[in-house]
Image (spheres, grey):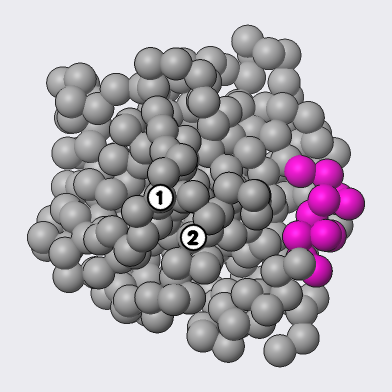
Amino acid sequence: MNARSLPALFALTLIGMTAASRGRATAAALQPMPAQLESQFALSAAPKGLRDRATVYVLDPRSGYHLSHQGASGVTCIVERTAWEMADFRDDIYIPLCYDAVGTRTYLQVIMDAAALRAQGMSAPAVKAEIEKRYQAKTYRAPEKPGLSYMVSPVMRAGGPPDMQVHTMSMPHLMFYAPFVTNDDIAAAPDLAVPATLRYPFVDRQGNGEQSYMIQLLGETARARILVDEAPLIHALCAYRSVLCLADMTH
C-alpha cells in the first residue's frame, strides 16, 4: 500500500481500514527522521522473522540513503520519502518497504537513486524524466526472476483510495513482481471505491510497465494482529509527527 501509478496501490485499503488524511504539507524540504525510529519503521515492513537478518538504509536528505545495518539475508528495508512517479516533491510521504535480493538490485535501486537526485537539487519533473530515460536506456531493468516486496508495516503515508490523495493508512500487504502484467491478464477488476474488490490479487502499475506488481492485501485478522503487536511503533510515529497518526489510535 505511492506516488506510483497507484503510489503503491501500495496505498490501497482493507475493509474497515482506518486512515487519517492530514492534508498537504506546505514545505517540500525533507527533514531526517530520528535514525532509530526510521530503522524500526523500515524493518516493520518485513515479517518479524526476517528483521534480524535484513539490511537497513536510512535517509540523509542532503545526500541520499546510507547504510545503517548490514544484514545477511538479501532483504533490504528503507522508508521511501520520494515517490518519483508523482513528479512532485512532498515532505509527508512515508512508505516503509523491504525488497528481496532481486528487488534490491532493481526496484530498490530506482528508489534510492530518486532520493539521491532530489538531494542533488534536481526538480521533481526532472527526476521523473531522468528515471524514465534510464528505463528506456535499460540502465534500469525489471527483475530477472520472480520475487516480492514486503509491506506489512502497520502504518504508511502515500496516495490512496478513494481519491488517490495522500493519506495515512494501515494497509499491510505483499507485492509480487509482475512486470508488464495487467489486471486484464489475471481477470482482476479492482475498484478503489469498493474495498471488497481489493481482497484478491490485482495488478498495480507503478509508474511504468516494468514497475508492475501483483498486490495481495493481508486479511483483516492479520492486520488487527499487526496493529496490536506494533502499537509502540504506531504511538512513536504519531508522537514524532502528527501526519503519521492513525485516526483510531489514541496518542
Q: Mark 2 — residue?
A: 42
Q: Earlier in the sequence, mark 1 or mark 2?
A: 2
Place residue 174 in its image quadrant: top right
- For this rendering, which residue is in front, 165 or 7? 7
Image coords of residue 249 (percent x, y): 76, 79
Do the residues bearing badges 1 and 2 touch, measured as CB atoms within 8 Å? Answer: no
Disc 2 is placed on an element classified as helix
Choose between 88 and 219: the one closer to the eye.
Answer: 219
Q: Residues within 10 Å of mark 1 (few under 14, many from 20)?
A: some
Query: In the rendered picture of this protein, how many numbered marks are placed on residues?
Result: 2
Q: Amino acid at mark 1?
A: Gly
The residue depicted at 53 percent of the width and 38 percent of the height is 149
- Let me know if residue 177 is in the magenta part: no
On screen, residue 100 above or below 172: above
Is any atom of residue 83 visible in this view? yes
Which residue is the site of mark 1?
Answer: 71
The extreme right residue here reads 221
Query: Picture coordinates of residue 27 (x, y %)?
Result: 32, 78
Q: Nearer the viewer, residue 133 or 50?
A: 50
Quarter of the image where one finds residue 118 = bottom left
Residue at image coords 64%, 49%? 49
Residue type, mark 2 in image = Ala
Boundaries of the magenta span: 218-228
The C terminus lies in quadrant: bottom right
**Mark sitting on residue 86:** none
Instruction: Please name which of the two marks, 1 or 2, marks the residue nearer to the observer.
Output: 1
